[in-house]
Image (cartoon, rainbow, N blue to C red):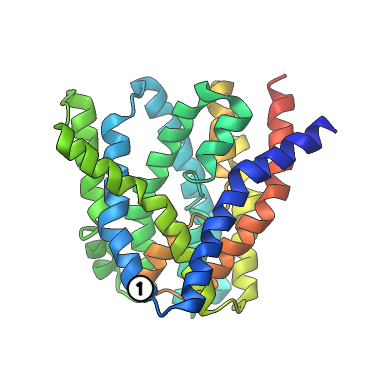
Amino acid sequence: MDILTDLFSIFINSIAPILVIAGVGFLVGRLFSVDARSFGRVIFNAFSPALVFYSLATTPVDREELVQLSVVMLLVLLTLLFLAYLSTWQYHDNRVGRAGVLLSAICPNTGNLGLPLVSFVFGETALAYAVIAYILVTILINSVGVFVASSGHSSLGRALRNILRVPAIYAAVAGLLINTTGITLPLPIARSVSLLGQAAIPSMLILLGLELARSMKLVHPRLIGLSVGLRLLVAPIVAAFLVTLLGVRWEVGRVIILQASMPVAVVTLIVANEFKLNMQQQVGTVLTTTLLSPLTLSVLILLLQRGSG
């Protein structure tokens, strides 16, 4: 009974707020004429870079833990990218649909779902590790994710060039410089960037609702099914294997496993929107993985808690 109570609390405190905010976006999209593409560009070019910069500039991290967690998390996501590439080989003629599956494989929702969930399950001491994983995934989304998304329509060379016009990349570099040099941001700049960054997560969820308002038709169900399987079922197995293989300290390893097993991040809608992927496929993937994740995450959390016992 205690387990059921805990799982219900996880759903109410972490997942229900996401669905509520997305529902607001859905209502706005139904009642008013809102250009989701333009709204997504505001997030892509303003809110998201501010969030990345402020997180990197102000979050204290241990360098050894940062390197260990980053390397293992990167290996997990690159392994999933490779498995997604192999599993979609039969769709090589559908570059756009295939790019959507590849993007979903490497983009877990380590932010607005992962951070509160790690805090709830493992406590505040584990939250710092979760933040590092979130920052790494954010950088990966805005580099490898952008390359994967733009490859749906672009040549290899053009896809690589598209990475150079992603503001979050430059924001990440600037944030790391501020953090490592110990420079203190002037108060007006710190407050401005902080406010912009705080707008990123709710805006992403509003965008999800806007896209749902445009169409809730489930297109390419096989591609969505592949994304769901990779993100919710294969990811925790890959993460647990690599954490064990590389001898990661359990307090760090369990955070890696849980963060790597999150549903597809809402931010993939912004990237998909910016680089003209199939938005119906991407919205369906985000929605399906988010709705099914309480089931898979509940089992995973139970295993992780027993593993630490």
- Residue 116: image quadrant is top right
Mark 1 Cα within 10 Å, few/some/many (few <14, many 20+)?
A: some
Total tally of numbered discs in the picture: 1
In the image as oriented, which residue stretches furthest toward the right?
A: 1
* Residue 86 in sight from this viewpoint: no
* Residue 105 in sight from this viewpoint: yes
In screen coordinates, is 165 left or right of 149? left
Q: Position of residue 218 (x, y in %)?
A: 62, 76
Residue at 73 percent of width and 33 percent of height: 303
In the image as oriented, which residue stretches furthest toward the front?
A: 31
Assign a secondary structure to mark 1: helix
In screen coordinates, is 33 left or right of 164? right
| For residue 49, above or below residue 56 | below
| Residue occupied by mark 1 | 37
Residue at 43 percent of width and 53 percent of height: 202
At label 1, the amino acid type is Arg
Query: Could you say which is closer to the camera, residue 2 or residue 151?
Result: 2
Query: Could you say which is closer to the camera, residue 270 or residue 105?
Result: 270
In screen coordinates, is 198 left or right of 129? left
